[in-house]
Amino acid sequence: MIEGRKEIIQLVFIVTGVIFLIKLFSIQILDERYAQLAASNSIMKEIEYPFRGLIYDRKGKLLVYNSPEYDLLIVSREVKSLDSARFCEVFDITQEDLISLFKELKTRKEYSPFKPTVFIKQLSNYDFAKIQENLDEFQGFYIQPRTSRAYESEVLANALGYVSEISKNQLDRDTSKLYRQGDYIGQSGLEGYYETVLRGQRGVRYKLRNVKGIEKGSFKNGEFDTLSIPGQNLITSIDLELQKYGELLMQGKVGSIVAIEPGSGEILSIISGPSYNPSLLTGRKFSSNFALVSSDTTKPLFTRPLMAMYPPGSIFKIVQTLIGLQEGVISYDTRFPCDRSVVNCHNHPNPTDLHGAIQYSCNPYFLQAFRRIINQNKSPNTFTDSRIGLDNWRGYVTRFGLGQPLGVDLPSEKGGQMPTSNLYNRIYGEGRWKFSTIYSLSIGQGEMLVTPMQMANLAAIMANKGYYYTPHLVKNVKDGSIDSRFTVRHETGIDSAYFSFVQDAMSDAIYGTASRAVIPGITICGKTGTAQNPHGADHSVFMSFAPKENPKIAIAVYVENAGWGGRAAASIASLMIEKYLTGEVKRKSLEEYVLKGDFLDKVVRTTPVLEAD
């Protein structure tokens, strides 16, 4: 009996042992899950962020590059006996900062105690050099390299834009599912518009580490690693030296400068004043600096060349001239008396023909010309006739790229406003307005708004005698090509012969209303404007192109609260043209006049009328 029990007990032990051996064989040999779980404790997945594409000017000068920086990652489960005093000493933070970092860490949606999570963002090269030798003191902390944007000069901030961490809303809207929390994305300017070109493609590396978290090399010799793919470089149309000079001239002023190469639509310079140093919106101090820049009452983040909308003032008389000639309601010899009973003017030969009206910017002349454009007796009802005339006029205006976004390769471009009959129907009621209601449009006032970019494009149209290419900032994507829409020629439908006539008048207008713009040896065609401002001093406007034969540059300048166009705006445009065409500025007295800026807030309106330039 006892012997039988002994054999049973032995058999149980043998069977149990066999079962354990089979299970052990299964775990170690047949089932890979346990091996993977073990490996997961010794393998760290490291994201390899790609180098963002570089940005150059038209001559190959570097504008934007990548600067190395580092994120400090934490795997909370691995943190053992953290010496907080030593940690604060090495990382140059306070105990309060450290406590705050731990509290904030656990509130993040992506946080897991078992996975690497960003603890401190964007350590600089200098920071990394200080902590590198001490990092092994802090078990559970790791370094992940990445890059931030850096700049060769302190200009072009609004056009270049900035890069920052992707927001939750942006992640929710990301249909491509390429981005993750903590990724950086272009938020404005070229960085935002060309994000898909510049961003590249991230890679991943799997690294072995020991129980102390020290790296011991690649997992399986990098068999599962993928390399990151850098973003493509952008070659812009910007002339860096011209951009620097323009930003110098705009210091202390509010407004815009836009310069375009007429024959291609390439933007040579785009200046928004006031602006900011692009280096402020990069690195660890991004958040605090962004708060300061965005709260600045002068709105340096507001890209005025694309987003500010103003009355064009007298520069719009050029458009009225061309429409009137094309419609056949005025001719080169048409004369009108300078009757100031409705709009004001200044002293000039009276009456004058069309050439003189452009040269001396006669307000009453263009009021009468606009009347002929609007009221062509196409209906016996004066209200209906005005509606027909306005709709016909607006059809012409839109072909000049006005009243709608041009399609510039930057985000947030505004289209301005060119009034329609529907607008006046809403304001006054259908059949209750006529020419006398809208006559202020004749000289670029009233319900008419344009952007500085549209003004510069208008100058390019004048230079090209009737057509334009969509203005753009990128002339080439490395390993790619320019968007085909920038090579499409847009026609205004106006006879080129009329442009030749207007060009002659514009070249004489320089001596009539903008003598400061005269450059010895260079024939400039230009037109001044003074935009009425009910909130203070008028705005100074000037558009021009040069040289008259084979134009190389078309430019528009808008300086707020600087008075009539022949002062600030014409002076700045003239200096920019001289700089671009000759490579230097010899008229130092004019440069000093602009830099001094005595014209700002000096002009006071004495009568509530529309003024000439």
Image (spheres, rainbow, N blue to C red):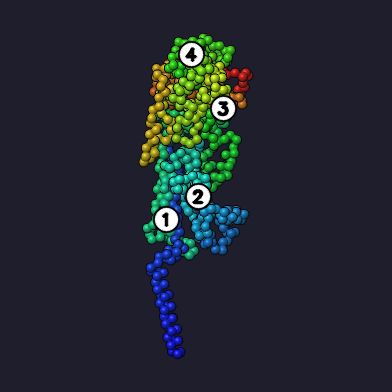
Select label 4 or label 2 by which is in front: 4
The residue to which callout 1 is attached is 205
Whole-percent x, y for residue 171 in the image: 49, 47
**Which amino acid type is shown beneath numbered disc 2?**
Gly
The residue to which callout 4 is attached is 377
Q: Which mark is residue 337?
A: none
Q: Nearer the viewer, residue 149 or 79?
A: 79
Query: Which badge, 3 or 4, is on the more N-terminal residue?
Result: 4
Q: CA distance from mark 4 to mark 2?
A: 65 Å
Task: For the N terminus, give its image quadrant.
Answer: bottom left
**Which amino acid type is shown beneath numbered disc 3?**
Glu
The residue to which callout 3 is attached is 560
Q: Which mark is residue 182?
A: 2
Select label 2 or label 1 by which is in front: 2
Q: Relative to 282, is 159 above or below?
A: above
Q: Measuring 62% from the left and 18% from the top, which residue is drawn there?
A: 607
**Which amino acid type is shown beneath numbered disc 1?**
Arg
Q: Residues within 10 Å of mark 2 (few under 14, many from 20)?
A: some
Q: Relative to 369, is 14 above or below?
A: below
Query: Which badge, 3 or 2, is on the more N-terminal residue?
Result: 2
Whole-percent x, y for residue 395 in the image: 45, 23
Q: Are marks 4 and 1 in contact (CB under 8 Å)?
A: no
Residue projecting furthest to the right: 606
